[in-house]
Amino acid sequence: MTQGRIRHLKAFSERHEAVPWLDEAGSSKDWRWRFVAALGRLFVDGDRNAVAATITDAPNHASRAAACVVTACALMDAERHVDAVALLSEQPDDAHPVDWAWMLTQRARARAEIGDVAPARQDAAAALRALVGDPDDVTASAIGAAAAELLFQTAPWGEESLDALITAIDTAVSWWRTQTVSTAFRAAADRTFREWADDRPTMRIDFEDTVNDRLFAAVVSADLTGEQGTWRATGSLLARNTLMVQHAGGDASRQTGALDELRRCGDEKSLDLAARRLWAIGPLCPLAEAARRIQPGSWTHTTARANLALWQHAGDVLDEATASDAARFCVDVVTDSSAFVSRTTPSFLVIPYTLDALRGLLATADDAVHRDLARLIAGLPPVTDELEARGWARVAAALRSTVVAAADDRVAWRQVAVSQPDPRLAAALLGLLTDHDEPAREVLRARIAGGDNHALAALGPDHVHELDAQVAERLMAKDAELLEVTIAELQQGAHAIRSRDPAERLAVLGVYFPDVAPWDVLLRYLGHARLPSERKRIACLALARHADRLPEPVRSALRELIPQLKATVPALNALGEPFGGAGMILAAAVGALDDQALTGGLPGLLSGSPPERRDAAALIGRLGRPEFTAALVALFGDPHPEVRGEAACALAMRVGSMDTGSDPLATAGLQRALTDPGARTPLAIGDGLPALGTPSDQARELIRPLLDHPSALVRETAARAVHGSAGP
């Protein structure tokens, strides 16, 4: 049962009349069979209450200890650690020393999770004392390993004894568990290889899911012995395997369970990756349901960071009430984290991670949360910690602009912005006002004149033209100086890494102030043979985006530059995103992409890396030629969501353009793209249409279903496309 071999147990029961199956075992006169049946209901059906019923009629101390420990493990699995401590504390000290140590170790584990570290250490130490004299007892050594691990993990810094821990955890049970996990790994490697080799035999019958069952056995072993660290590690392996298998199989319920198990195991890194992936490609329901499972009792030492990570990435698909409650919890933590720290004893920076979670929840949270948060930010003292300032900047950028609609609100908002020492935070606060508040734009322009790039980003493309031409000329001159230094370094074979890309700012400002831009320096920089190609990408795309603003001499020079962009050095893959199709996109924008170059270069992009295929979709969307619509529809079947998103965006722009005729294939492709189960593709569709100015009636009608999408971000972008506003 504890090895997950339910099928084997069923077969054994059928061969031996004396061995009852689970239904019969539940009504057996023998308590031991009733205990087996209760374990079956726990492991097979997830009934966490089944074992608790066997405590009261346990026939002896050993049986009672076993029932209490399994029940306590089930309570902790349900994130009811306080109840687990209460249950184990109620038990009298009349069990065998090993059984008593077993219960003490589990109580120590539960206490440590909810911040009762000192009592937990006392329990673990008492368990080790109770185990003295049983060096050859296999289960006693496993329980002792769990107690020793807890003492090591909770010891003050510098007082840990690694030698003692290594000796304590080197047990027969740990050897067996390692072998079990190794068997699972071999089975997983075999499965992955067969998938890579496209092995599709006419008939394959797997009587046992070896990967799942072996990992399950290792998880149960670590859980019952109380080895929290091992339980977390093996539980994460099982959850990741389940998520991958069930995502391919389409079982949404088990995907939810796997996400929840990742969270309860505290594997925030894997949970982060899984949540991002599901948000992008779907399905979204497991993501939302897993996030809804976070309850007040969910905040433990193991789960705290993972809870925040899930809110950060799933907040966009939560319902308003759940997201609002979660956001208020985050606000309470950032205003006073003492209770949070006391319960979870975190090993991470609480405020920055909580702010990241709050940022992810704001798209769905109600207006009251936004108003309360705006008042909180307006009263912030100067934030000097860089990570906290970055977090507050992201939160401020996610607020709805309506929270500072009144004139008095804007004055207070500007005052708190200029008082902030961190330029990123100050710019984010001012950026919320840029579209409706001239004094805020004036402050941003003054900061831009001082070289503040965060202020330039906050001002936004719609207001860059408001800069003083002399200020723009001075900033571009500084960028040109840095580019000259870089060119000199390239001549020496050096590749310096800088915190910002001067070519990007020069290109952005240059398209708005072309008469004073040092184009010669930028062109020499982009055309340098030793410049890694990924360092050219952003500037090339910025020039392409605003190519219609460029003077004809600059466009002509760029047309001559295109061949040099193709002949660049191999990418270092360390200094930015690969160059991809940026050269062809720029060539199309400045009129240098003839049919010969297009037919010669486009197939390479379409069959290239994911970034190249994404650029191929963007290029086709820019060209607007119906003969390439079929390629866009094909790209929508790409395995990478960023490629599908760009292809869907291009299809939407094709259908939505008022300047092109009807394209039935593009319309059919867009209709299919709108059914994508994730959020990235619908978001790309909603983002693309407003760029057309006034999308066609057909396009607006096609995307109207996105107004009810599970993602709040998708709903908002769809509202802008359909109604020409930010929506509700």
Image (cartoon, grey):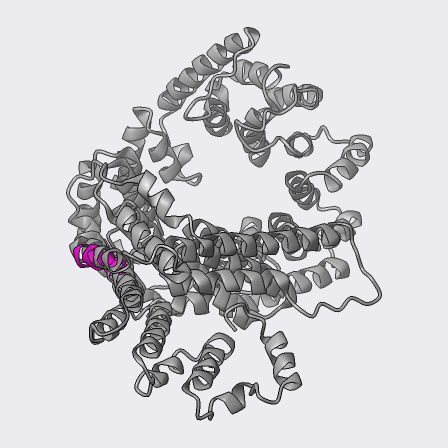
Residue drawn at (41%, 86%) of the image: 31
Left or right? Give the position of 711 relative to 58: right
Q: Quadrant of residue 544?
A: top right
Whether the magenta-drawn stretch holds residue 439 is answered as no
Residue 721 in sight from this viewpoint? no
Left or right? Give the position of 577 relative to 569: left
Q: List x then y, in percent, for residue 374.
A: 23, 54
Q: Quadrant of residue 592?
A: top right
Magenta stretch, overall SS? helix
Residue 605 in sight from this viewpoint? yes
Left or right? Give the position of 334 relative to 580: left
Quick check: 454 above or below 258?
Answer: above
Q: Nearer the viewer, residue 590 or 394?
A: 394
Q: Nearer the viewer, residue 322 or 621?
A: 322
Left or right? Give the position of 18 relative to 400: right
Residue drawn at (71%, 21%) of the image: 563
Quick check: 207 above or below 472?
Answer: below
Q: List x then y, in percent, for residue 121.
A: 21, 54
> Magenta part of the protein: which range?
112-124
